Amino acid sequence: MLEIRLLGSFEVRRDGETVEIPSRPSQSLLAHLALNTGVRLRREKLAGLLWPDSDETKARRQLRQALWRLRKSIGDEYILADKITIGFNPDTNYILDVDVIKDDAAWSRAKDEVIMNIADYAGELLPGFYDDWVIFERERLRAVFELQMQLLLNRLLEDQRWADALRCGECWIARGEVPEPAYRAVMIAHHGLKDASRVSEVYQRCTDALRDELGVDPSAETRLLFERLLKEDKALETPPSTPRHNLRHPLTSFIGREDELNQIRERLGDPSCHLLSLNGPGGIGKTRLALQVAHELLHDFTHGVFFVPLAHLSSGELLPSTIADEIGFSFYDGEELRTQLLNSLQEKEMLLVMDNLEHLLEEVIFLSEILDASPGIKILATSRERLNLSGEWNIEISGLPYPKRAKIEKFEEYDAVQLFLNRARMISPSYVPSEEERRSIARICQLVEGTPLAIELSSAWIQSLTCEEIAEAIKENLDFLTSSLRDVPERQRSLRASFNHSWDLLSDEEREILQKLVVFRGGFSREAAKTIAGASLSTLSSLLDKSLLRMADRDRYEIHPLLLQFIDEEFRKSPEERQLIQGLHSRYFSEFLHERTGRMRGARQDDALIQVGTEIENIRPALQWLVRQEAVEELGKALDVLRVLYDVRGWYQEGEQTFSKVIECFEGTLPPLDNCDADDVKFLGRAFASHAWFCHRLGHREMATASLQRSLQIAHKFGLKDIEADSVDTHAIIALRQGEYQQAERLFQESLAIWRDLGNIWWQAAELSCLTHVARSLGSLREAKHFSEDALTMFRESGSQWGIAGALNARGTIARELGEYERAEQCHQEALEISREIGYKYGIARASLGLGQVAFQLEDFDQAVDHCQVSLVTFTELGKRIEIPTVLTVLGNIHANQGEFIEAKKRFRDALEIALDIKSSPEILRALVGLAPLLAREGEEKKAIQVLKFVLIQPEIKPSDQVKADRLHNELVSELPDEEIVAEVESLEGMDLSEVAKMILTHRSKK
């Protein structure tokens, strides 16, 4: 193992022992090669870069000497060298500290190894080295470090890891710069630790540093944050300094477009503009421009800015689930998905960047529905064509400004030229064009009409060709396109010319690999590219250098949609090879899903969901191909993971459609059941059970029942016990949701017995959790306690973290209802810590609600409000409207107990309205019980008794609400004559629950 440290000092260790590299040139050579791992650098370029003051002959001799010394010090295997090029071998066993700075996942997820070694990563690159290339790399890494630190601090603040945020923020400040984001993060962390004096101290340090170093005062953002923190008496969940967003930080700098940026900002700032479309041909830079605007407007939208990529979306039906996924909204059952999403966006002030809409024009009416329902939403869309929606504003995007005359003045002030030079210097940092090259660069920009993607493709060849050769090749391709291919749109010809030029210069192997890579959608990992397309790291690096691939994330690549189209046209010339690669792609992702089956219900479920979610755009076409090919075995491998994925993400409609197609495929390949054996039908039975589940989630009860019957028929006929248990469990949950508690209890016990016989720990824990819920609903708290303890034990044994969190919350709720408040608090607190650790937001919301309810019982009302507010905000962010009425009624009870009756009434009425909207009978009844004593207090005693009497005869009322309603009813009845009570009750005969709820909402009190 070779360890190379370039940050803070130059140090090399091999197998733990220090390696001496005595000469500075050899150190510089190793550093430069390591920073460009996988890239084969031409010897003359390398010599000129490292010895710029020597003539070429002397510089190349010095390079040979340095290379010889380097090989002698570290070994030959780490260096790839021939007569023309030198490179660092990426396939060797090595560690480079700089690589950690570039690892987006490690920083954005705040991995412990990053935090523990943060001081090392904050060190200067190669201190004491003053070569031009080092200074350039040092500045580039500084920018990357600052970006990663911002991501890291945001995550730490979101997770309330105050101590870690302090450590990392102070480390950033200690670098000797004046990073305001770091000062803001440190202020928030001290605020989270309830240390107000330190908040003021940090702000003063920031002010002094800015005035001493830059002669300026803190920005408005820093000043307003400080003022807000001073005003707050208590710290709830302190938000990060950056609003919610999902924007990835581009790996390349943004060049020019100032006029367009100003125009977009102006129009989005216009109150009458809610839908703005950026239109223009592919490759013109619409996406990059939209992303730049999104980053600049982060602080202008209270509920965040979200990028919704649509280029690889196969159907407009997936629009709601795609948007929901990007904004972090989770669907629930019982309501149509579009309606749920529209409801969740109603009160939001948010910017949605909808990218690449041109292939979904028939379905974009959904965007109008969003804007109609949500006045605070603005949409910035990119499309090659206008959307033709009412209220659409349009900006046409064209190429970057470029020199249009032979005599070039102010050469580098043109955006197109700046882009060419910027990208060229990413490949060759010391590149300075000669006068002749400047004319050729201008010619290139003219030929491609300032198209950014074409400029990037052209500049990628700067190490292999002269600028004059690049320009001539583009001109030849352009002449051919103009004269021969009339069907090529005129505005695409310059880009096609650049692509054709790049295509022609590729090796046969590179062309073959690139064609195979078009099978991917939504990007691909290095492992997938190697397995499916046979792409080595060096080939991927070469294609990346030529701008034919781009990095989507660390170890993840993507192809620009328009280049994908061009390459696919080439690949379609080989239909047999294309079919073969599609098969490899589909089987790879079938196995990919199968390998994650165990993790989906275990300790690593969170990671598995992220991995599968990342590949969903590859998984969807893979499933479609497998269905068309009737590949039963490969489809069967994917079923279990797909069911969990669709359920957890709330993609019920996609789940129903997918399993319906799978069933159709299976039935089309099987003979009659009497001629089958168990192996033939095991996947079919499981598919029917899963189909039944998603039909139930969508409220299609008849379809759910029919699929359940088919699943049970197959399970019984062939003795498939796991499928039988799955089907019985699904039936039980349906019964539970319909309030048929006795039947649900019988079915859960039946399913539990089967899972015990099969020895499946996770499913036993799941059934016990369901039995806990049933026992609570029936008022059997002691039995519920027993079930919850058994469920918790088994979830711990299975390692399922979210299962443990759910069982702890259930156990805490039961403890509270039994009056065991200390035990309840312990359970909810542990559930909260686990949920935070794995990023399980639903668990955070449930645990916070539980802690709020315990605090309420202990009459710690301030703490109760704090916890409930966290729960309310989190459930609202998740779009879990079905949970919100419960939180609102708890808040209503807290306010009522403090004598804040106006606020209490508002909370109860809000709860009642939402419960009525989502048709949740238990929550309607709970809100009515909360409102009844307020009616009585307003002089409406008879109306209050009327409501309570009605509530008490409803079968859906929860036992705890029934006890409270009965107590309130008896207290009020004792103050009225019997004949008046009977008259009031009779007036509700014939009304249903929703009618009573609406009557209360429209009722006006006497006081």
Image (cartoon, rainbow, N blue to C red):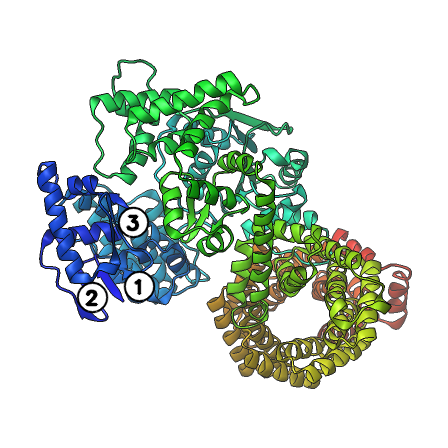
Question: Residue 13: which numbered mark, if any?
Answer: 2
Question: Residue 713: which numbered mark, if any?
Answer: none
Label 2: how many residues lie within 10 Å, few (<14), some (14-19) or many (20+)?
A: some
Residue sitting nearer the eye, 542 or 237:
542
- Of tags 2 and 1, the one toward the viewer is 1
N-terminal of the two: label 2 or label 3?
A: 2
Residue 549, relative to residue 627: is it above or below?
above
The residue at 52%/59% (across/down) is 610
Identity of the amino acid at label 1?
Answer: Asn
Asked where in the image residue 421 lies, by quadrant, the reply is: top left
The residue at 48%/38% (across/down) is 560
Question: Callout 2: helix, strand or loop?
Answer: strand
The residue singled out by tag 3 in the image is 180
Residue sitting nearer the eye, 497 or 593:
497
Residue sitting nearer the eye, 34 or 290:
34
Residue 836, relative to residue 108: is it above or below?
below
Asked if residue 727 lies left or right of residue 872, the reply is: right
Question: Callout 3: helix, strand or loop?
Answer: helix
The residue singled out by tag 1 in the image is 93
Q: Where's residue 227, x and y in %?
A: 36, 51
N-terminal of the two: label 2 or label 1?
A: 2
Q: Where's residue 474, x and y in %?
A: 39, 24
Identity of the amino acid at label 2?
Answer: Arg
Q: Is residue 193 visible?
A: no
